Amino acid sequence: MAELKADVLVLGAGMVGVGAALHLQKRGRDVILVDRDGLAGEGTSFGNAGMIECASVFPYMFPRDFREILRYAQNRSPQVRYSLADLPAFLPWLLRYYLASSPERAKQSAMAELPLIRRSLIEHEALIAEAGAGELLRRTGWIKMYRSDTSFAKALSDFERAKQYGVTGEVLDDAAIKQREPQLAGEFKGAIHFSEPGFVPDPGGLAKAYAALFKRKGGRFLAGDARTLEQANGGWRVNVDQGAVTAREAVVRLDSFVCDVKTTLEKLWSQLGKLESNGAIITGATGAEPVTSEERSFLKQHPDFAVRATGTMFGHTVETQFPLGLGLAALAISRGSLFPANDSSGLEIEMSKPPAQIVVVGAGHWRGEGMALVEAIK
């Protein structure tokens, strides 16, 4: 088969990979962009928050409050989860992180990051205009809301500090929040509306628009397997559908689903214990590839289990799809039936009797790292 040559090989066609390919191309490099299925924006970039941030000046720092540190140490916070057995391996790094989070060094980090973060929207605006994708950018900023006096007070303090570096925004009370976002329920102590950041409602679509621009400007975008990357003749080589690509340099920007999702799901399934025949599976699969095809292959190994996909009934809920699946599973068991099948492909089938066990699968836009068993109490 043919061997293609380039100056630079970019592995991964998410937002970072496509952006790197475009900027290398702009600097006169001959670039080949490679992704697993030859499609851009189908991994993490498919369904992220879509924020083009230019207001977050300060990086996340190690906490200084003892009570907060204790909560993290006891694995009682959703922001951090660790295994005590791994502590010796990451403790030296943790100590360096703590030392680097002193007020003085935090200021140094902010000053170093400021020129980069302030240009993020400017760079995207230029690429969006060149790609002809102006409809994918909204200049609405974002609103961060707080339900407790303590968290709101800290946010106001951080905001005052950020304003010294050019960050702008507006402080909102509960009435102003309700006026701007009337669908929100509950009482809020306050909010800060950061007006400068951009919002992209379809991050995967923007990555595809950038990839199309890359190809229009002469770039080559190929389907290939990043796991075949190897050093060769002083450069790099990777297998693609057309043969192989060699380049002097390589940029690697890959999602973690380069591993086999089907294998991961089977491994998790084996840890669930004995499952009854009147079981079901609820999945958050969205149609994004390659995770959907790999999950479908996994489901074929368990034909006795009725399947329901949350996306066919509720749309693509991104980060909330797994807890949504857990809630639906508990509701289905308590009511004695699954929600109706809503998929014409034949994957979703009816059940002959009430479900006693439901397996919720965390395969969604790009990964399959979670699985939970919900069952009736006997």
Image (tube, grey):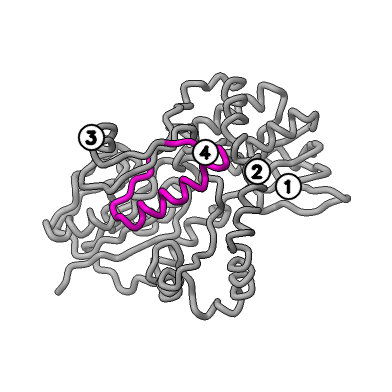
Mark with earlier residue (1, 3):
3
Split into 4 quadrants, where in the image is the C terminus? bottom left
Asked which secondary structure carries label 1, the reply is strand
In the picture, the disc for residue 167 is 4
Asked which secondary structure carries label 3, the reply is loop
Which residues are drawn in magenta? 143-169
| CB-based contact (under 8 Å), mark 1 and mark 3 | no
Relative to 317, does residue 277 appear above or below in the rendering? below
Mark with earlier residue (2, 1):
2
Relative to 306, does residue 5 appear above or below in the rendering? above
Is 78 left, or right, of 359 in this rendering? right
Asked which secondary structure carries label 2, the reply is strand
Q: What is the spatial separation of the Cα atoms under label 2 and label 1, in whole angstroms?
A: 7 Å
Specify whether residue 296 is in view: no
Is 272 left, or right, of 278 in this rendering? right
Split into 4 quadrants, where in the image is the N terminus? top right
* Residue occupied by mark 2: 224
| Residue in the image at 59% along x and 75% along y | 91
Q: Nearer the viewer, mark 3 or mark 4?
A: 4
Q: Which amino acid does label 1 sit on?
A: Val
Mark with earlier residue (2, 3):
3
Asked which secondary structure carries label 4, the reply is loop
Q: Does the magenta stretch include residue 190?
A: no
Q: Which amino acid does label 3 sit on?
A: Pro
| Furthest residue in direction right, as rendered | 233
Q: Position of residue 114 (x, y in %)?
A: 62, 43
* Residue occupied by mark 1: 238
